[in-house]
Image (spheres, grey):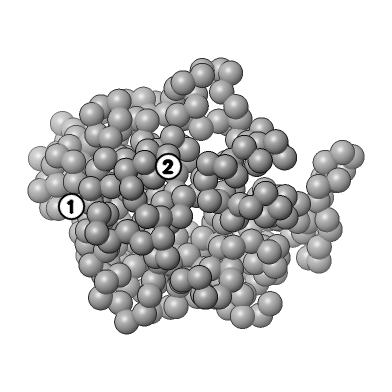
Amino acid sequence: MSDAPRPQVIAHRGASAYRPEHTLAAYRLAIELGADAIEPDIVPTKDGQLVLRHENEIGATTDVASRPEFADRRRTQTVDGEHVTGWFTEDFTWAELDTLRARERLPELRQASSRFDGRYPILRLRDLLALLDAAERPVRLVAELKHPTHFASIGLPLDELFASEIAGWADRDRLVVESFEQTVLGQVRERGVDAEFVYLLERSGAAADLVARDGSSAPSYASQLSDAGLASLAGQVDGISPEVGLLVRAASGITGRDADRWRMLDHGLAASTLVSRAHDRGLLVYTWTLRAENRFLPAPCRLGGSPAAHGDWLAFFGAVLASGLDGVFADQPDLALEARAAL
């Protein structure tokens, strides 16, 4: 994949704006639309099978809430410091999860996708690997390991489970491993998995593994994106993937010292120096997530009053893609490819 067009367009949970995310239909459509890579989120079952869901809580993305035989599985637990109520993959065997059907996660915004509710089962990682092996062209896998500190604490070590599952398939040219927790990336690398390792970062807060280790003194994501933080990460991971608002945002409100690291663009947008600063330290840069709906666009790119309507996605996508980064995650991979072609 080293000769693939840049920036790479990564189908976020498949073509997730058009079909319920993490379903065979979403993944197949992403390949048909021309995505360079597919990104699944990976969580384990009670019996150690790796399944593809946005979160371990599956009440919003499956029909589990309507299944009386699983009513007693609903509970509240703490995941990465947050109290979450619902149904969790770690409370089900794979045989049980295999009876559920997927639902659109954002039905209020993606009514067309919600027409496919109930049609598709949950998939395992091995099912996606088989789909990629059968594809008529190379399609990269960008595997996100979710909540590894949480799962390790209940006897489901994601590094071990993932390394075992991916053995014999992993190849750096076609596999990226990513997580919001750097610890698990190092653990997977130590298990001999041949991949590119990418650290996901949010605008605020701190990584769950660092909070578990250091408590309130854990370094923040923001500190890790400072020049010193990037220099430290450069010796430990291959790349970073910050949320898109850290790369391109509305220009309004950028004043004073903050303006030193932003340059004004057209369409009321501004771009930060983060891509160039990371590249200067040898880090690849990805970002998440490009979405065409007004709800997810910065104010200057919104058109009309409907959150579900498409805004001026081409202006925003184009600004992000022109920042010099190496890859973008997109719910509408076809639109991201169109924006890339227009550069």
* Residue named by callout 1: 100
Q: Please state which amino acid type lies under the numbered disc 1.
A: Leu
The residue lying at 25 percent from left, 54 percent from top is 167
Image coordinates for residue 23, horizontal then vertical, percent: 29, 62
Left or right placement of residue 207 versus residue 39 in this view: right
Q: Is residue 36 left or right of residue 241?
A: left
Q: Position of residue 43 (x, y in %)?
A: 30, 44
Q: Position of residue 213 (x, y in %)?
A: 46, 21
Residue at which label 2 appears: 185
Residue 5, relative to residue 102: is it above or below? below
Badge 2: few (under 14), some or many (20 or more) residues near its Cα, within 10 Å? many
Residue 300: tell me if it is visible.
yes
Residues 257 and 298: in front is 257
User: In the picture shown, does residue 126 fall above or below 95?
Assistant: below
Q: Identify which residue is drawn at 71% across, 52% down.
A: 280
Question: Comparing marks 1 and 2, which lies closer to the viewer?
Answer: 2
User: Does residue 178 appear to the left or right of 254 in the view shown?
Assistant: left
* Residue 22 in the image, given as x and y percentages of width and height: 33, 59
Residue at 66% across / 33% down in the picture?
Answer: 223
